[in-house]
Amino acid sequence: MMNQSHKKIVDGYSVSRGSYEDCLNYVENTVKNIIKSQSINVHEIIGRVKTVESLEGKVKRKNYSNLAEITDLCGIRIITYFRDDVDKIAELISQEFEVDVENTIDKRKSEDPTKFGYVSLHYVVGLKAENTSPTLYGRFKNIKLEIQIRTVMQHAWAEIEHDLGYKSKEDIPDQYRRQFSRLAGLIELADDNFLQLKNNINNYEQEIREKLPTSKKELPIDSSTLMTYVTEDQNYIELLNTIKSLDVDVDFNINSSFLSTVVQRVKKLGLKTIGDIDELLERYKDIFLRISAIEMDIIHYTGMSSLTPLLHITNVLESVNRIDISDEEFMKVSDDQFADIFDISYPIDVYEG
């Protein structure tokens, strides 16, 4: 049963809970916007406001004297894919909000480096006057929020640990503590390795950019090399500019499944390096532009993916090989004979990517 002091806290919260919900909505939208502005990709951002019933249980367990002492009445959880993004987002939070250093907990900084378990960064924040409109600041200045930042792997561990019902390591039966520690260590190791993998891929993509102008024959065909080629190679960009001059919009937001399809297709045709693709482009780009001009009179499309020209050119290669005709003979075929002889057609969704 609650005493009068606890009842006063719960009643006060019950009356003001709407303000906490409004404050949470404002902070959650702000957090999403600042993360998006830095192009940080996250798994999830979710917010919640504590229920009155949950608060009743909390004040019974802990000796609070007033509502302002409770710093987790509303909160946001940010789940990142990679460990280094936790610190990037933490810096953004520190710049945007007033951090309550006394109540902020960085559980990643374990006192005992030999122990594993739940790790996460828990910020307690309030609004900053200089970053908030006077009206909103006046309304929400006394509200504190908890912002948790963790990786997908850390979140998985926390959810499993919670589902098993253990609040602390002391709750775990002695015979299972070692197994818990081993699993927690694997989670931490996975986090480290995913970050290393991301950094390796970033380094590889930088190496591709450096080699692209002069060493295309050294670049094997994969999603990374092909993406870089169609977005940065000067010859390919010139082809796309020619297409744009025909009043066709070119979309550089390439769908990953479409990219994978083209990678598989060029490999199936025996192409092995980006240099092979570049030679194919040089050989058949005039034929491709002719095909495009013919089809634009029929389909009247207004946009295409930046990958579509390459897909067209591989279709040209396949058709030329199938009917055993030289490039010179190919170019001499009249427009009205073209479709029947070569049977080249493309679904409209290819143009749209």
Image (cartoon, grey):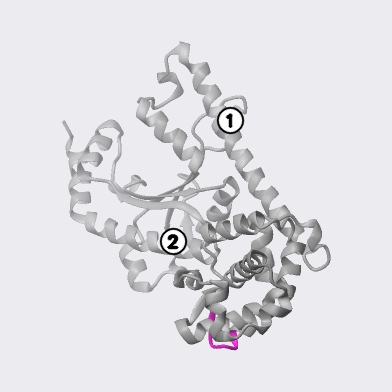
Tag 2: Cα neighbours inside 10 Å, few (<14), some, or many (≥20)?
Answer: some
Instruction: Report which quarter residue 233 is drawn in.
Output: bottom right
C-alpha separation, residue under disc 2 versus residue under disc 1: 32 Å
Q: Secondary structure at mark 1?
A: loop
Q: Is residue 76 above or below residue 288?
A: above
Image quadrant occupied by the N terminus = top left
Instruction: Report which quarter residue 138 is drawn in.
Output: bottom left
Inspect this view and state whether residue 16 appears: yes
Q: Position of residue 304 (x, y in %)?
A: 52, 75
Amino acid type for the residue under numbered disc 2: Lys
**Residue 184 on the magenta span:** no
Q: Is residue 58 above or below residue 175?
A: below
Residue that numbered label 2 is attached to: 32
Q: Is residue 343 above or below residue 39?
A: below
Residue furthest to the top in view is 175
Q: Secondary structure at mark 2?
A: helix
